[in-house]
Image (tube, rainbow, N blue to C red):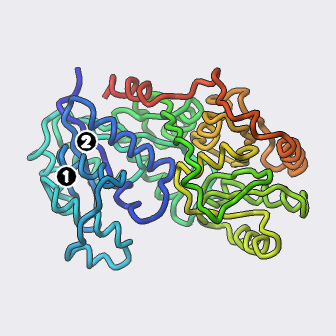
């Protein structure tokens, strides 16, 4: 039987306002908001801010969606927003707007009373962004009679590969996973490979909640050449690398490949902002840009522009060292674009033999493959592979909403 209501945590999306293009995790939270607003059961939304919790009803959640998707603008900031001096101005406006729309506001530590006053027993709480998995949040939901907690764990990379993480994130993630193991009624994973990692770590942390696999849907953006910036004209062979520049994404390998290719190398378009712990890569990028411009950074491209550039490119290069799902290869494959990527279990699971797999440290093989693809015309991959069946959001939600 469907629950009397659902509540989606929007803390991550609100915190990301003003911080540039959405990440893969942001997109998942947004997809949940869209879908749950279409469901017949009432939807609430929860946002944690520096000054306490905000609880939105369905009208408030719909207004937030309109603003996340650009159909409306966030309102003016307020006094509390002006006290958040280090927050991005757009985040301040978002929180102020939602404060004005909230059906309940409370201090940290008082969420339980607010939930009891506003929500029916049996409400299901969804947390898909790894944000707000805090003791006071989960304890408050446990205090609501018959409430259920569903948490989507995207991956366990912070624990499996701590060398790629920012300072402090490993401990923080371990604590979140431990709380999930202790409190969640169901843990959602996006692939069997991820489920195995989650089960291994949760067993070590002393918990074993029910776990189900529901692959994420792929909403491949519609390519629109009109969105490509006028100053970005790539008429010669070029390749795309998509993702934040951080150690796990292994941009250093691509720079080694381009060094080996020499002055006649095709262009490499890096579509992603600069992240963390990659100062040597940043320095190399600056030097390359000053010398010959064969490697181009564009962190400001929207989805339609990225899709259009992928369609025009000779391929997506994705030498990542670890992935929980790997959206860029899936999105590129949906467009019929050649994909060259590291041989990772989750990509094998989702894409099988539809992509080219290479070791993430073999410069020679990557160089050889780039040369081969650069010699191909781009017209021969204008059509998507009709045999490639990508995961759909409807299948994802049919799977999870049947049990939550």
Q: Residue 183 carries which label?
A: none
Residue 355, percent from left and from top? 73, 33
Residue shown at 46%/58% (left/top)?
A: 172
- Mark 2–mark 1 distance (CA, rounded to whole Å): 9 Å
Q: Quadrant of residue 372?
A: top right
Mark 2 surroundings within 10 Å by alpha-carbon count, few (fewer than 14), some (14 through 19), many (20 or more): many
Determine the residue located farthest toward the left in the rendered image: 117
The residue lying toward the viewer, choosing from 327 and 176, is 327
Residue 309, percent from left and from top? 65, 49
Left or right of 57: which side holds 290? right
Mark 1 surroundings within 10 Å by alpha-carbon count, few (fewer than 14), some (14 through 19), many (20 or more): many
Residue shown at 17%/46% (left/top)?
A: 57
Q: Residue 7 carries which label?
A: 2
Height in image: 74 above or below 180? below
Q: Residue 55 carries which label?
A: 1
Residue 31, percent from left and from top? 39, 40
Q: In which quarter of the image is residue 401?
A: top left
Q: In which quarter of the image is the C terminus?
A: top left
The residue lying toward the viewer, choosing from 144 and 242, is 242
Height in image: 231 above or below 358? below
The local secondary structure at tag 2 comes to: strand
Q: Quadrant of the N terminus?
A: top left
Mark nearer the N terminus (2 vs 1): 2
Q: In which quarter of the image is residue 156?
A: top right
The local secondary structure at tag 1 comes to: strand
How many labels, in total?
2
Residue 294, percent from left and from top? 79, 63
Residue shown at 64%/65% (left/top)?
A: 231
The residue lying toward the viewer, choosing from 392 and 164, is 392
Q: Are marks 2 and 1 in contact (CB under 8 Å)?
A: yes
Left or right of 112: which side holds 276? right
């Amino acid at each position: 039987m469907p629950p009397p209501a659902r509540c989606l945590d929007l803390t991550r999306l609100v915190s990301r306002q003003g911080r540039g293009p959405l990440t893969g995790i942001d997109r998942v939270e947004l997809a949940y908001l869209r879908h749950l607003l279409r469901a017949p059961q009432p939807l609430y939304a929860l946002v944690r801010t520096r000054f306490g919790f905000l609880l939105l009803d369905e009208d408030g959640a719909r207004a937030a969606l309109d603003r996340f998707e650009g159909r409306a603008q966030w309102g003016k900031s307020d006094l509390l927003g002006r006290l958040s001096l280090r927050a991005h101005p757009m985040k301040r406006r978002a929180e102020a707007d939602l404060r004005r729309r909230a059906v309940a506001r409370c201090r940290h530590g008082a969420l339980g009373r607010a939930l009891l006053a506003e929500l029916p027993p049996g409400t299901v709480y969804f947390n898909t962004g790894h944000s707000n998995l805090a003791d006071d949040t989960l304890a408050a939901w446990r205090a609501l009679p018959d409430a259920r907690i569903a948490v989507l764990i995207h991956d366990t990379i912070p624990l499996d590969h701590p060398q790629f993480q920012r300072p402090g994130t490993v401990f923080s993630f371990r604590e979140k996973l431990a709380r999930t193991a202790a409190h969640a009624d169901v843990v959602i994973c996006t692939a069997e490979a991820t489920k195995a990692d989650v089960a291994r770590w949760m067993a070590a942390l002393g918990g074993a909640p029910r776990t189900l696999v529901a692959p994420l849907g792929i909403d491949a953006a519609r390519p629109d050449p009109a969105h490509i910036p006028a100053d970005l004209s790539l008429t010669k062979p070029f390749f795309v690398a998509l993702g934040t520049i951080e150690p796990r994404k292994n941009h250093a390998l691509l720079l080694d490949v381009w060094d080996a290719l020499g002055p006649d190398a095709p262009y490499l378009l890096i579509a992603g902002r600069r992240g963390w712990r990659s100062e040597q890569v940043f320095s190399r990028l600056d030097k390359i840009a000053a010398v010959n411009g064969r490697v181009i950074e564009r962190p400001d491209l929207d989805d339609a522009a990225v899709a259009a550039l992928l369609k025009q490119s000779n391929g997506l290069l994705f030498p990542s060292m670890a992935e929980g799902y790997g959206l860029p290869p899936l999105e590129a494959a949906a467009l019929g674009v050649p994909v060259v990527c590291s041989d990772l279990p989750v990509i094998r699971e989702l894409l099988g033999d539809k992509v080219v797999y290479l070791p993430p440290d073999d410069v020679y093989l990557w160089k050889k493959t780039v040369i081969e693809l650069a010699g191909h015309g781009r017209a021969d991959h204008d059509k998507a592979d009709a045999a490639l069946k990508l995961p759909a959001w409807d299948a994802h939600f049919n799977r999870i909403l049947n049990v939550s």
